[in-house]
Image: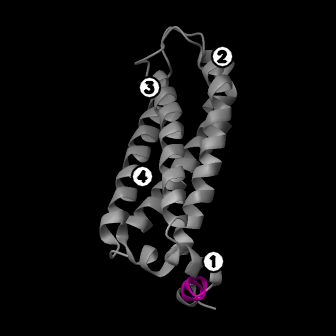
Amino acid sequence: MSFDHWLHWLSDTQFSTFMRESVWAEPLLETIHVLTLAVFLGFTLLLDLRMLDIVLRGKRLARLFEQMNPGLFGGFAVMIVTGVLLFTADPVSFWATIFFKLKMIMLALACVNVLVFNFTLGKRLGEWDGAPATPAGVKLTGLISMLLWVSIVAAGRGIAYALPPP
């Protein structure tokens, strides 16, 4: 089965039809998606700004990660689940927009950025966390993260304007 056929199959499922035809399902999921994005993005931007030595310079990054990880991971999980459910409402139309494809590419890159940090600089967090300045690689990771998440949000908004009205 080709990807295009899979998208049409998904669009024809009962769940997809329910999502499209329900008065409340899609708006409710969209609200949860956006509110969770706000929580996740707030934590992410705060950590990124700390990684750039712009805010909370007196706070150890390890401690901030420890405090914010539950909100970050919880928010990310809910965001992904609601995003997938929203996609099922009209997968063919979503996939047809350049904004959706860009959002998915940038989301994958944001995940790679986190993984690269965690398996490289993050493993040596204890070595540099108390230093007077954050290492350049950590600052670069924070900057890339900020740029990607701002772009992900912009692409998400672009999807809404590119889709045909219901």
Pick the residue in front: 165 or 62.
165
Is 45 displayed left or right of 59 in the figure?
left
Instruction: Give me the C-alpha separation between circle 2 and circle 1.
Output: 50 Å
Give the amino acid at mark 1.
Phe
**Residue 95 on image: x %, y %:** 45, 75
**Residue 101 on image: x %, y %:** 43, 67
- Judge depth for marks 2 and 1 and give the one in front: 1
- Residue at the location (42% across, 66% down)? 100
Report which residue position mark 2 lands on.
127
Q: Earlier in the sequence, mark 2 or mark 1?
A: 1
Is 6 displayed left or right of 161 in the figure?
right
- Judge depth for marks 3 and 2 and give the one in front: 3
Give the amino acid at mark 3.
Leu
Report which residue position mark 3 lands on.
49
Look at the picture and state if 22 lies above or below 7: above
> On the image, which quarter does residue 85 sit in?
bottom right
Q: Earlier in the sequence, mark 1 or mark 4?
A: 1
- Residue at the location (66% across, 16% down)? 127
Report which residue position mark 4 lands on.
152
Instruction: Give me the C-alpha separation between circle 3 and circle 4.
Output: 18 Å
- Residue at the location (56% across, 81% down)? 17
Instruction: Say if mark 4 contacts mark 2, CB within 8 Å.
Output: no
Instruction: Give me the C-alpha separation between circle 4 and circle 2.
Output: 32 Å
How packed is label 3: few (under 14 Cα within 10 Å), some, or many (20 or more)? some
Instruction: Say if mark 3 contacts mark 2, CB within 8 Å.
Output: no
State which region is magenta.
Answer: 6-12
Query: At numbered mark 3, what does the secondary structure look like: helix, strand or loop?
Result: helix
Instruction: Give me the C-alpha separation between circle 1 and circle 4.
Output: 26 Å
Report which residue position mark 1 lands on.
15
Whether the magenta-drawn stretch holds residue 29 is answered as no
Give the amino acid at mark 2.
Glu
